[in-house]
Amino acid sequence: MGMENYSGNTLWLSVSCGKLTNKKKDIHCNAYTGTIKKIEVKKDEYEGKEIEKVVVSLKDGEENAKIQFTLESWYSVGFFQRITSVDLYLPVTIGAMGSDINEKMSFCWMKQGDKKIDKTEIAKPKKVKLGNKEVTDFTEFLEVAGAIIVSLTEKLGENEPQEDKDLPF
């Protein structure tokens, strides 16, 4: 209940198994449409380990929503491959779809109006061998994603109405 009061009227959606979900409200949808207001990275914890999550704040009329997903994920790769092609002044549909290979894996898609947002080439995670194990190295991708977040944050700041400092109140 305290979390509901803290977040106000914000609908929180997490990317999970190819859907945008809110388990408490029993919401499982394919996409959400709104105007992006903010993109940030927050620290979180999963199974005792610290992880980073991307939080995208959207507004659709009177409704506020936040879509969150793990920064080191294939969903995140798809998000950052597309977000630089979005017109930040217009509503965008951000969606999730599942994988045919792994039911827990999610991929991102976007559209603006009727136009599908195609992906642009950015540094992707690489498979590397550590001893006998093969792991996914997100290092280069994280640098690119960080730069995109900084750039978009600056652009989103330009979208906000500027206050007139000369007013006496």
Image (cartoon, rainbow, N blue to C red):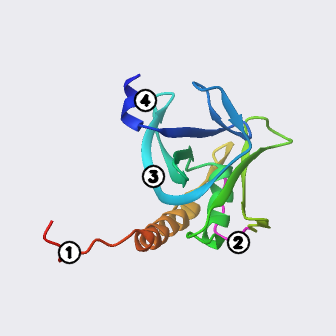
Give the structural element (helix, strand or loop) at label 1: loop
Q: Earlier in the sequence, mark 4 or mark 2?
A: 4
The first of marks 3 and 1 along the sequence is 3
Q: Say which residue label 1 marks.
A: 165
* Residue 83 picture location, percent across and down: 62, 65
- What is the crowding at mark 2: few (fewer than 14 residues within 10 Å), some, or many (at least 20)? few
Image quarter in which the N terminus is found = top left
User: In the rendered view, would you say 165 is above or below 131?
Assistant: below
Residue drawn 59% across and 39% down?
Answer: 14
| Residues drawn in magenta | 119-128
- Checking the image for residue 125, the label placed there is none
Q: Residue furthest top?
A: 1
Residue type marked 2: Thr
Residue type at mark 4 is Glu
Circles 4 and 2: CB distance less than 8 Å?
A: no
Q: Position of residue 77 (x, y in %)?
A: 65, 57
| Label 4 to label 1: alpha-carbon separation | 34 Å
**Image quarter of residue 86:** bottom right
